[in-house]
DNA sequence: ATGTCGCATTCCATGCGA
């Protein structure tokens, strides 16, 4: 089973890229972030025409997440528990059948948090607290699950071309890394890091200042695997070629292959 | 390099978020 994640930076601006990816790569599941549309504006028909069903948790203008699947999505849960006043659409979870067993998948758009001296950063850290609490509950069920998405976290210096540029940034501050470590220390596996120790593997290149041309990238899109999923990890592939397309997203898709 | 995008507004220019 192939489970991919992609911050698409507006699904309506990138619909041709998306349908091309579904047809060319054909992941079983694709988690999307920053769809930037309300549910009523989600291009469901074009996705169904590619042979996928979809669960959507959208909002006007910003954020918005979705999960696409070749098979039906069950037990869909929109929103990250822990704060009923949070109106930002950043979390969606659903189950998909894989032969005899079910796999729980979440599409995550973790807050950016910049600038760090504002309530945006406090929101990021609090959101990570809620994710840790929720993941802890999922782990107690001892099932196969994958938390995939844009974490807005650069885990280590080797995950940035120029780590010194990110020293004071919300994506790489010590408190951010401590929260990410707490999450992983629950017993989750960073799929890419389970497959290679190589640095220089990036999933995001800024639109500005020729970041792509200079390969000034960062790795911020991750799959965190439950132990039952990590046991079945085969490979991880970053679809870097997507960043070279016309009018690309600033993020590229990344996919894991699980032997279920 | 204040360097680029995408969205929305009372709207053809600007502010916000990334």
Image (cartoon, rainbow, N blue to C red):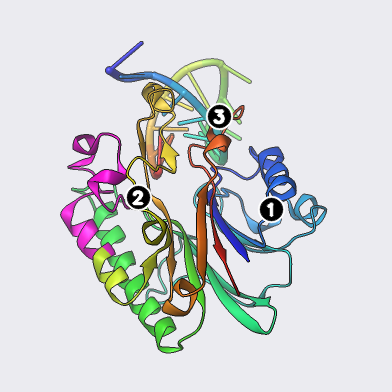
> Closer to us: mark 3 or mark 1?
3
Report the quarter where the C terminus of chain A lies. bottom right
Q: Is residue A137 left or right of residue A99?
A: left
Residue A247 image point, x, y percent: 59, 29
**Numbered disc 1: secondary structure:** loop
Q: Is residue A203 above or below residue A236?
A: above
Q: Is residue A205 visible?
A: yes
Residue A34 image point, x, y percent: 52, 49
Report the quarter where the N terminus of chain A lies. bottom right
**Residue name at image x 49 percent, y 52 percent:** A63
Q: Tell if the residue under mark 1 belongs to the same chain as the one under mark 2.
A: yes
Query: Dot 2 corresponds to which residue?
Result: A112
**Residue name at image x 68 percent, y 84 percent:** A100
Query: Dot 1 corresponds to which residue?
Result: A42
Residue A246 image point, x, y percent: 62, 27
Query: Dot 3 corresponds to which residue?
Result: A244
């Amino acid at each position: 089973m192939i489970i991919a994640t992609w911050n698409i930076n507006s699904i309506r601006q990138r619909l041709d890229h998306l349908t091309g990816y579904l047809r060319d790569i054909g992941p079983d599941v694709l988690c999307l972030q920053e769809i930037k549309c309300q549910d009523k504006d989600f291009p469901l028909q074009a996705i169904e025409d590619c042979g996928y069903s979809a669960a959507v948790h959208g909002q006007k203008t910003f954020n918005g997440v979705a999960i696409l699947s070749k098979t039906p999505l069950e037990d869909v849960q929109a929103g990250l528990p822990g704060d009923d006043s949070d109106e930002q659409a950043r979390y969606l979870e659903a189950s998909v059948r894989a032969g005899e067993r079910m796999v729980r998948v979440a599409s995550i758009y973790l807050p950016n948090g910049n600038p760090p001296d504002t309530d945006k950063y406090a929101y990021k850290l609090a959101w990570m607290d809620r994710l840790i609490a929720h993941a802890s509950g999922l782990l107690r069920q001892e099932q196969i699950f994958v938390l995939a998405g844009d974490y807005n976290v650069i885990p280590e210096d080797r995950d940035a071309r120029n780590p010194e540029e990110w020293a004071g940034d919300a994506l790489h501050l010590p408190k951010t890394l401590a929260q990410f470590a707490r999450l992983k220390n629950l017993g989750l596996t960073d799929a890419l890091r389970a497959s290679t120790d190589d640095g220089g593997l990036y999933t995001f290149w800024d639109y500005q200042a020729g970041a792509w041309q200079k390969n000034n990238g960062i790795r911020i899109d991750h799959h965190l695997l439950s132990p039952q999923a990590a046991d079945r990890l085969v490979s991880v592939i970053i679809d870097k070629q997507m960043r070279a397309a016309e009018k690309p997203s600033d993020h590229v898709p990344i996919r894991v292959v699980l032997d279920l």
